[in-house]
Amino acid sequence: MKYLSSHTARRRLYMIFLSLIFCVTAFSCTALLFLWRDAASTEVAWQSGVTDNRFVAARYSTVLTAVSGISLLLLSFVLYRNIRFLEYSEAEGRTILKTAMDGFWITDMEGRFLEVNNAFCAISGFTRKELLSMRISDIEASESSETTKEHIRKIMISGQDSFESKHRRRDGRVINVEINVNYLPIAGGRMVVFVRNVTKKKLREQRLLQLSTAVEQSPTAILITAADGAIEYANRKFFELTGYTPDEAIGQNPRFLKAGDQPEEHYREMWERISSGNEWQGEFHNRAKDGRLFWEMAYISPIRDISGLITHFVAVKEDITERKLMEGKLTLMAHFDPLTGLPNRALFFDRVETAVNLARREKRRCAVMFLDLDGFKGINDTYGHETGDRLLCKIAGILKNSLRSSDTVARMGGDEFTILLYTMTNHNDAALVSQNILDILSHPLRIDDHICRIGASIGIAIFPDDAKEVEELVHGADTAMYSVKKSGKNNFGFFVRETSDENSTSPV
């Protein structure tokens, strides 16, 4: 069944036009014949003086015939102009459809293709000749032929439809298409369809969805801020980590999270770097909504538009709280005695070096004291190692409380302790500290149900009087301590360089 095309309509108009031309010609001939006859009759009538009504009627009839002919002639002219306009409109419409980027087709209600444009041929991969011998079901990849027929019936009822589908190309590839259909109730029903290939668009949407899902479900917190730092997006992990809701966080500057114990210079350096277009990485100590403190390792990068202007920043933040706690534990293990919590040998030597360098620069004194407990082995053997360990912890507390906050007491191992007096005026300062410790230790100490009596031998070496270097200073204090032990224990003494070869001290 052929559809009523503009070509058919134009052909019918031409037939009407030719019929009108024939009528105009016939009317014109008839009018000329009447005019000629009436003219002759009128002349005879006037010459004979006869003015019968028949002659008047004949004259009006002749005039009416002439007017009718002229009207038909004008009508024919108008009809001719309409035919020309239709031809122009048809040519213009065909040009638009042929050059359109979207595919176009017309089908009957059985789904047979009646017209297709070049764009749809390119989309489908079929030639125009091949398509005009096919049906919609031949290229439809997401519906069965029965479903397609039912769809056509629904479109006929609704008059139009827009939907997405899949088409199978000539090479077998399946593509995604957007379809807009309009139903025309002519020639048994026609469907005018525009088709757009959206395969690349769907692929971009799919990749964008994958990216969005990956960001949202990332195990690390991800932030996107405006150029001024205001949060525009945060993923689920960010809200889990901080405890804030989107309404509370969006629009805020991320610094609302800071714990307040990092210097402002840290944030200023970060901001200067990223605002100048560079990447930055570093640690943040932040506070969650519930007050919990946590550490983050942040990686921040600027986002630029096509003109190179920075429009946003993206930050990827990893929760490193557990790592920082482990680092703290490792630091304690590396620099502190696990039993007493006092600085160990390594940290003590590091602090002595700092104190010596400062004293040398400021031309003042500092002192190192070496303390060995008297009678500890007997208590350890009598009451057991657990009691001995508790006693060491108690003595560590006594020593720490006997010093200034700037001084250091450390455990060197076993029952040996060292003390750093960071600053001192003269020898008497060290003597006073030593005597105070001996006085406290002279009192019995209760450990659980046991009464423990213990003393101490203390050796003292002073910088720069007794030594100029750290190792020499500590060694001098150690030497002085052993001299005290040989002299009877439970006392303190100063290192004397002149007699150091004999391991002597100047006892007090």
Image (tube, rainbow, N blue to C red):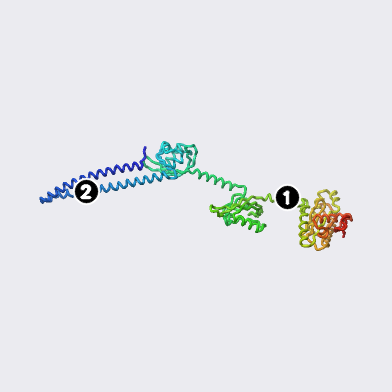
Residue topped by disc 1: 330
Label drawn at residue 66: 2
- Disc 1 packing (10 Å; few <14; some 14–19; many ≥20): few
Q: Amino acid at mark 2?
A: Ala
Image location of residue 169, percent across then percent down? 47, 38
Q: Three-letter amino acid code at disc 1?
A: Leu
Q: Residue 437's image quarter?
A: bottom right
Left or right of 410: which side holds 219? Answer: left
Q: Is residue 169 left or right of residue 324?
A: left
**Could you tell me residue 58's position as x and y percent?**
17, 48
In this view, the residue farthest toward the bottom is 425
Residue 4, position as x, y percentages in the image: 35, 41
Specify whether residue 312 is in view: yes
- Say which residue appears at 55% left-offset and 45% top-offset: 207
Give the mark, 1 or 2, whose residue is nearer the N terminus: 2
Q: 249 or 503, which lies in front? A: 503
